[in-house]
Image (cartoon, rainbow, N blue to C red):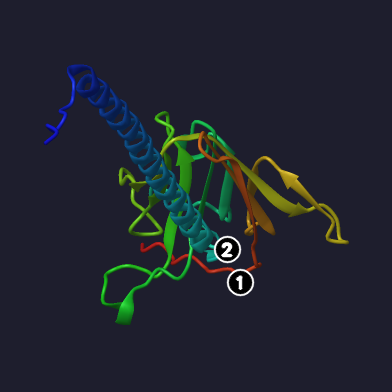
Amino acid sequence: MQAQRGFTLVEILVAIAIFSLIAAASTAVLTNVIAASEQSSQSIERLQSLQRAMMVIERDLLQAVNRAPRIGGVDNNTTVFFGGAGEMQSTHDGVSFVRNGWQNPMWLLPRSNMQGVAYRLNSDNVLERLHTLFVDNDLGIDPIVRPLLTGVTDLNIEFMVAINSRNEISWDESYKGTKVPKGIAIEITTKEFGVIRREFALLDPPAVPAPEASS
């Protein structure tokens, strides 16, 4: 009867080496898959943040009204829309205006359904939305600041205005007027997505008079 032959030491070492190579290759593949999955999740999260920011901006702009806010307790004459470099202490462009449609069901809250809003880019590359609880603020009342999007390297805002009676238009880098401009373009630059440009056509809403100051 022939005796069964076992594995030699060399064969065992070769087998261990093969299994080690397979394990190392599998670990590298798994590591790459996990890293790609994390990068994909981060990209999706950033894209969702960008989409949310654009939705907020669009909602505000499409409800802009011809209403001159009283800033710091001082009447602002008839200027309803401000925009340009350094507006609202922005490191790049900024814009401020009054919007309608701020929900106040059954007028239960002690405020108007209008809201003063502004957008700016701070020194930490964060796009911020500012708003006030009351359209006509008293002196010393600071706006509420909400971080909207991080990692923004540039904020460029252009304003569409009519240049003649034939409604020919131009895009200006700054705006200060008694009416909402005919349109506005927002360019947001980030490292992940580059330059994102959205253009919004704005209607010419009727003027909303400011309340008379109490004597």
Image spot of residue 191 (x, y percent): 51, 33
The answer to whether marks 1 and 2 mark residues whose Cβ atoms lie closer than 8 Å is yes
User: Which residue is located at x 44 percent, y 33 percent?
Assistant: 125
Q: Secondary structure at mark 2?
A: loop
| Along the viewing direction, whichever of 149 and 210 lies nearer the viewer | 149
Dot 1 or dot 2: first in sequence order is 2
Is 116 above or below relative to 11? below
Q: Which mark is residue 45?
A: none
Image spot of residue 34 (x, y percent): 33, 40
**Gap in angstroms between the C-alphas marked 1 and 2:** 6 Å
Image spot of residue 163 (x, y percent): 82, 52
Is 194 above or below relative to 77? above
Q: On the rendered image, what quadrant is the C terminus found in?
A: bottom left
User: Are there few (<14), some (14-19), or many (20+) residues within 10 Å of tag 2?
Assistant: many
Callout 1, which amino acid? Pro
User: Which residue is located at x 69 percent, y 59 percent?
Assistant: 182
User: Are there few (<14), some (14-19), or many (20+) residues within 10 Å of tag 1?
Assistant: few
Q: On the rendered image, what quadrant is the N terminus found in?
A: top left
Which residue is under mark 1?
A: 206
Relative to 173, is 207 on the left or the right? left
Is 124 above or below relative to 188? above
Relative to 5, is 201 on the left or the right? right
| Along the viewing direction, whichever of 75 and 191 lies nearer the viewer | 191
Hey, which residue is sitting farthest bottom in the picture? 106
Q: Secondary structure at mark 1?
A: loop
Which residue is under mark 2?
A: 66
Image spot of residue 117 (x, y percent): 44, 54
Callout 2, which amino acid? Asn
User: Which residue is located at x 35 percent, y 59 percent?
Assistant: 134
